[in-house]
Image (cartoon, coloured by chain):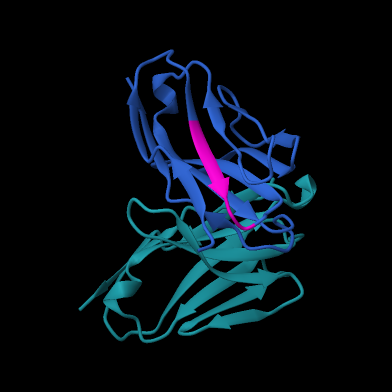
Chain colours: A blue, B cyan
Amino acid sequence: EAQVTQNPRYLITVTGKKLTVTCSQNMNHEYMSWYRQDPGLGLRQIYYSMNVEVTDKGDVPEGYKVSRKEKRNFPLILESPSPNQTSLYFCASSFGGLKTGELFFGEGSRLTVL
Amino acid sequence: KQEVTQIPAALSVPEGENLVLNCSFTDSAIYNLQWFRQDPGKGLTSLLLIQSSQREQTSGRLNASLDKSSGRSTLYIAASQPGDSATYLCAVPLYNNAGNMLTFGGGTRLMVKP
């Protein structure tokens, strides 16, 4: 089944404790991206990647890192999480990028930073 | 900067009604426009993708239209059902970012009452 898989789905952590949210897609998509969704602010893009070893910042990259060492995986890294990073995070992927391709989303990862 | 607006923010209708959701965008230089559905606590599901050269797309009871010159798209849902209750979002890729970043509208929360 074609899908985008995120882990963990739910996480409660404390300020400053490094964490990684994994994202994997099985559709051989070149384009992958991360979003966060907050009440009243909607969906905002954090980082995106056009292909292996090619990443770029979105609207709200501060406090986040990403890597794209393999085509299927695009982990989101919070080196030193803070309470303002409490949010619902989504990973998404697309074949050929957003100019032509539909965007497929994962189920989301709800992160709480205390 | 592209701004995407969805009106109304919330809509409640009785089952069986035909309804129209609106999406407007400020910059008509778009590659495409995509409509998504989001169920509570879930990821986004792509409903329809309209390329800039197209006027409309249809999938089952859904029909999306695009008028680039006026900066508008509508999502028409025929014979609404309680299962259609969800939040509907539209999104456009940013033209000045080579289409690699997506701007989302705030969404319309739809409730279809039995």
Viewed as shown, does residue A6 lie left or right of A97? left
Q: Split into 4 quadrants, where in the image is the C terminus of chain B?
A: bottom left
Most foreground residue, A29 or B35: A29
Please say whether residue B73 is visible from this viewpoint: yes
Is residue A73 rendered magenta in the image?
A: no
x and y, in percent, of residue B49 in the image: 62, 69
Q: Is the magenta stretch mostly helix, strand or loop?
A: strand
Q: Quadrant of residue B28?
A: bottom right
x and y, in percent, of residue A94 in the image: 65, 56
x and y, in percent, of residue B5 in the image: 53, 56
Viewed as shown, does residue A80 lie left or right of B110? right
- Tell me the residue at 50%/63% (across/down): A1
- Tell me the residue at 41%/63% (across/down): B8
Q: How many marks?
A: 0
Q: Which span of residues is magenta-colored?
A: A21-27
Is residue A24 rendered magenta in the image?
A: yes
Please say whether residue A41 is visible from this viewpoint: no
- Tell me the residue at 74%/40% (across/down): A52
Q: Height in image: A18 above or below A60?
A: above
x and y, in percent, of residue B108 in the image: 41, 61
Q: Split into 4 quadrants, where in the image is the N terminus of chain B?
A: top right
Viewed as shown, does residue A44 lie left or right of B78? right
- Tell me the residue at 49%/44% (across/down): A90
Viewed as shown, does residue B96 lie left or right of A23? right
Q: Quadrant of residue B10?
A: bottom left
